Amino acid sequence: MTRKVLLLGAAALAMAPMAAWADGHLSRGGSGHLNIIYWQAPSTLNPYLSGGTKEVESASLVLESLARFDDTGTMVPWLATEIPTVENGGISEDLTQITWTLQEGITWSDGTPLTAADAVFTWEYCTHPEGGCAQASYFDGVESIVAVDDLTIQVNFANPTPFPYTALVGSESPIIQAAQFADCLGARAPECTEANFGPIGTGPFVVEDFRPNDVIEFVANENFRNPDQPYFASVTFKGGGDATAAARSVLETGEFDYAWNLQIDPTILAQMEAQGNGTVVTAFGTSVERLHMNQFDPNPELGDIRSTAEAGPHPFLTNPVIGQAMSMAIDRALLVEIGYGAGGQPTCNVLPAPELYASTANDGCLVQDIAGANALLDEAGIVDTDGDGIREYEGTPLRVLYQTSTNAVRQDTQALVKQWWAEIGIDAELRNIDASVFFGGDPASPDTFQKFYADVEMYTNNFAGVDPQAYMANWACDEIPSPATQWQGSNIQRFCSEDYDALIEEMAATADLERRGEIARMQNDMLIQSYSIIPLVHRGGVSAHANSLGGIRMSDWDSELWNIAEWYRIPE
Amino acid sequence: MLTYTIRRLILAIPTLLFISFIIFIIVKLSPSDPTANLPLTIPPEVREQIRESLGVNDPIIVQYFKWLKLMVWDEPLHLIDNWFGTEIAPPNEPGSRIISYQTRSPVMDLIMQRMPQTLWVVGTSYIVGIIIALPLGIISAYKQYSIFDQLGTFISMLGFSVPTFFTGVLFIVIFAVNLQWLPSVYDTTHVVEDWDSFVVQFKQMIMPVMVLGLFNAAQISRYMRASMLDNLNQDYVRTARAKGLGEGTVVLVHVLRNSMIPVVTVIALNVPAVFGGAIITEQVFKVNGIGQLLIIAIQAGDVPVVQTVSFIFAVLIVLFNLLADILYGVLDPRIRYD
């Protein structure tokens, strides 16, 4: 037998299962029906009117964008033929223009062709001043979007934009059909209930029935560009209940095939998974649970000026030695074990991913070192002078008010951290605030995270997409919330450094990816080593799917359902 | 009686206006923000624009009168159009319907879509509750302090004091997870068209209906028992027995009719709660009823939905109070209002 024959035989063997699949479940609709449960129910299918994850992800079955991010955070062309770069001429040399080319022959689910005019319309729709578009930030800096011809879309930026993959990229800024939404601009947007509840898309599925805050029925799109996909013929997208019930319905009763966002007690989740009906999957993006250390004085006696520049610097949290000791005292691995399970990893960076941007300079914090923290404080002369068990710094006892939103995991974390801090002579008073108030941003409420009327606060933040430029610019001096800005602003811990601001400017003018990575890592290290921010846990999305469901490549960079066209039922 | 009814109805108008204003003020002044639940990646300027487009920043009194006008004038016209196919309502324009913040669709449509599920599940559980409660109450009273009475008291205390979020989850763990007899998630898209689909519908309704039914039965059976006991010791009962009437006639005709007066009031006064749905039970079994609508709206700071749903409850409560008063007159000829 020659080698050639052997190879042919091997190839035939390899192909055999594919052939069997082709006529079975791996054909359009061949896998039957799929049941998905999201314990928060979608309110609308127009992601531009909501901005919530549940709406964006449910709409991603129908609406698509020019490019999206796969499970590794890599950008993949979706409706476009390729990703434009400076090298292939898709991005102008002065970084103010990006030109996308649509794939030929893509049609909407109603059979009409997708054209560049739809992309232009999407931009007009979302940037209409009266529309209240939730994804308007994706079009920040965009001066115009022009249809050069039916398939060519030119996005013009007002300023050089080194990372121009924002508008019409990713699940949060998909292309909507101009014909369907033509009469829905601006203040008229809410009237188009029919369009908002049943957008026509280019995606693998078509909305058959939408019940707000309850359930959505999808069927396969007959006009989808890949004739074999989607493999599922129909999808039921149920919403409501709570995370535990959603996990139970996949892992224990088997009523559903896929459940999203299962942030529940890790031991309970592990017990459910042990029943053998399904598998827990995780994906890590950029979410980091962190402590912010107020750099301004939040003393209540200061009244309205507390936590602002007029209040002056914080009496002791501006000293990095104290912040460093507080960070060393924390056992991040234990926090993960108790509160997050598979959905968390200890981290020492506020920018933990993508890999290019992740610094390794701070990894020492991964190991708890209470003795070291005590020694550090002793060396710096920050000792307990009056014998009450609490250290003093320049006469001020190290007592902090530590606040966060109401959430079982966060309260567990608070209790543990309080204990560890007590061991190094720092006293923490704990406080939790209802999430809708804490994150509500009401300038009249004293309890918002922006006002930060406390010494330490804890929550999670992240950024959408893969480029950290805008995110790292959050810590610019002029982003500090204050009464003058109605307490708007993203520099929550009130960090301010000229060197840091200079890096922000450099980042905005740098296109070279390597250099951008370097700048981002420097920014991260500068923040971390100021100890104005103490990262705790790199949080991932946790979902579960039935063992009979195949093809899942969960991504935290895009909609979790980004490749649902490729999902299939594994034959028994 | 008619004059009385009309007078009560007219009096209800200022009451309801006052209630609507109080609801509005409470909901408005409580700290809530429709953009609070959005991801933190959405910047503050965009949030401000969203709030602006929702009209959250208008003065409170302007928002109230806008809402009131839509509630008492435009929305009823839309309802009439919807029912009778007429076209008397003003055409759809910005600001011609009460719009939910979350879904950006008319609130009334959401309520109409959810009403059937609530009436089916909560309504059935109410009827089941009454069917269990009346005989339970009657027998418990007639055989006071018997084993049956003690058992009935025990069960109703249990039903009354164990919260539905506990019994609901307990039922799910037993019947859905361990025995796998019944579904744990209510399928709201299910359509009953033949015997098999009816069986499916029946199976998915068993748990929510029984959880709520147990709770309702506990309450009503206590009233029934107490009322029966009051009457069983009356002179007219002794007279009836002395006349030689059978025990069946004495208990089921003489005593029962008189005992029903307070029980009917309790039953009538609780009917608005049926329309209100059962917030917790609906959430546990994922029934998309009014209760679930309300709780999601509260969590999302969706003020128009909260206001409208609460106001409809207020209207129903006022109306059923009136109905209970009128029923009094019907059941007891001695009571006359004119």
Image (spheres, coloured by chain):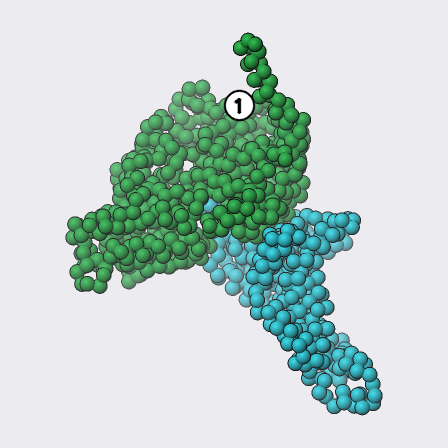
Instruction: Please state, as top left, top right, bottom left or bottom right, where the C terminus of chain B lies in the image.
Output: bottom right
Q: In the image, is B250 to the left or to the right of A11? A: right
Numbered disc 1: secondary structure: loop
In the foreground, A349 or B332: A349
Tell me the residue that label 1 is attached to. A81
The image shows residue B229 at horizontal and vertical percentages of 69, 82
Instruction: Please state, as top left, top right, bottom left or bottom right, where the N terminus of chain B lies in the image.
Output: bottom right
Q: Which three-letter amino acid code belongs to the residue tagged 1?
A: Thr
**Residue at point 54%, 32% (across, down):** A65
The image shows residue A375 at horizontal and vertical percentages of 20, 50
| Chain letter tied to cyan | B
Q: Is residue A278 visible?
A: yes
Q: Residue B322's image quarter? A: bottom right
In the foreground, A126 or B166: B166
Crowdedness near tag 1: few (<14), some (14–19) or many (≥20) residues, C-alpha within 10 Å: some
In the foreground, B43 or A455: A455
Task: Give the colour of chain A.
Answer: green
